[in-house]
Image (cartoon, rainbow, N blue to C red):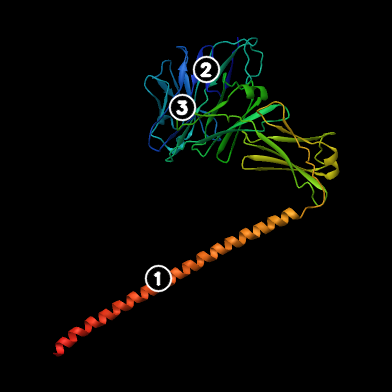
Amino acid sequence: MIITIYTVLISLSVVAVLGVTVEQNVLSLTKAKGKSAFISCKVTGLSSNNYLHWYQKKDNEPFKRILYVNHGGGTFTADANHPERRDFSVARGSYDLKVGPLKMSHSAIYYCAYWDTSSHSDSNYSHPFVSKCDSSYYDYKLFASGTRLIVTDVKPKEPVVSVYSISTLQENGKRSLLCQASDMSPELVRFTWESTGGKVPETDDELLEQQDNGRVTSMLIINQQKATSNKYTCKVTHETREKPYEISDIETKKPVLSIYSISTLQANGKRSLLCQASDMSPELVRFTWESTGGKVPETDDELLEQQDNGRVTSMLIINQQKATSNKYTCKVTHETREKPYEISVPEPEETVTGPPTTCAPRQKEEQNLIRGSSGLSQNLFLFRLTYVVLLVKNVLYFCSVSVLLYKRSVWNKEPLMSKTH
């Protein structure tokens, strides 16, 4: 029987086949030049006749095997083809790779891997990276997720983590959650989403990830039913912390709605209607205007929207003829409710027309004038009283100073007269 051998790289945190697992939980490791680094690999179920292999992957370079370790760890064999094989070893009694003393050239991603030597029939075992061939049995080399080693004197910086919802009301009934990690060093994180029922499987919901300008963003797209019945938490793994950073989804709060008309008698014969949603969370709503004849087309009338200080306002500008012949309703869609909130424009109040009365306003004007004149008289009286008090004070001060000066001059003359005698 011909056994065809395939090497397969699996980008997973844990790789398990028939009870054998290899796991690298540490995403990245930052160390200074001249130090030593220990890169861990957790192995379970490895048979006595199998080995654990360590590989190095630098940017724009192929994989290079460093060494392989026997069952149980401790004893290793270096790969003679690796140019820096003397810089690597294995910690005693383990599968952990020791690198050091560190050099800048050691910066790379390090993977632990093993051969799956058990036979797999093509009828009951398949792998997306392996093409079918004539043989019914395969062997695989399975890799763990890898750990990036960064040799630098710059200390790691913890990420700023934030979570919020966007496009909560998509046409297909989906809701999107964003979890963002920014301003960290190194720029390498791992996202995990959890709901009330546990970890969110990637197969159940759409999960996207993007990295741009020092930010790494994970987007989880879920249906509206799951969004309302579950609370979601984003966990971010970074080397600055052993346990992941956790941040929960924003708590929802229904909007406060109000509707009213302004400038009902504009010069151009237009009437403006305002529909406002405020004090909600998240601050994302959709407005829809309806009249007696159905939905208001945006092309027929002028429709404006503005967001400011936690309020979102929709303004509908219509002509006076439509305003009088139709009843308008504003519908506000928010994630706190499946059906939109509805609020109608109140009917305009009737104004009583007739000849204006002049007696009552005239009496009020006279009363206001009387009150104003009496207040002015009181102010003038207080001003005069204050002025008189200040004058009296100045006169008394002048008299006191004059008396003191006179007495001083008299005292000075008496000694002179005594000296002449």
Hey, what amino acid is under mark 3? Lys
The first of marks 3 and 1 along the sequence is: 3
Q: Quadrant of residue 274?
A: top right
Residue 214 at what x, y percent from top left? 55, 40
Tell me the quarter of the picture where residue 251 sits: top right
Q: Amino acid at mark 2?
A: Trp
Q: Tell us which disc is closer to us: 2 or 1.
A: 1
Work out how far the residue at label 2 is from the one at label 3, CA to CA, in angstroms.
31 Å
Residue marked by disc 2? 115
The mark that comes first in sequence, 2 or 3, is 2
Q: Residue at x 71, y 33 (%)?
A: 332
Nearer the observer, 252 or 220: 252
C-alpha span from label 3 to label 1: 81 Å
* Front residue of 162 and 18: 162
Residue 400 in the figure: left or right of residue 106:
left
Q: Residue furthest left?
A: 421
Label 3 vs label 1, nearer the camera: 1
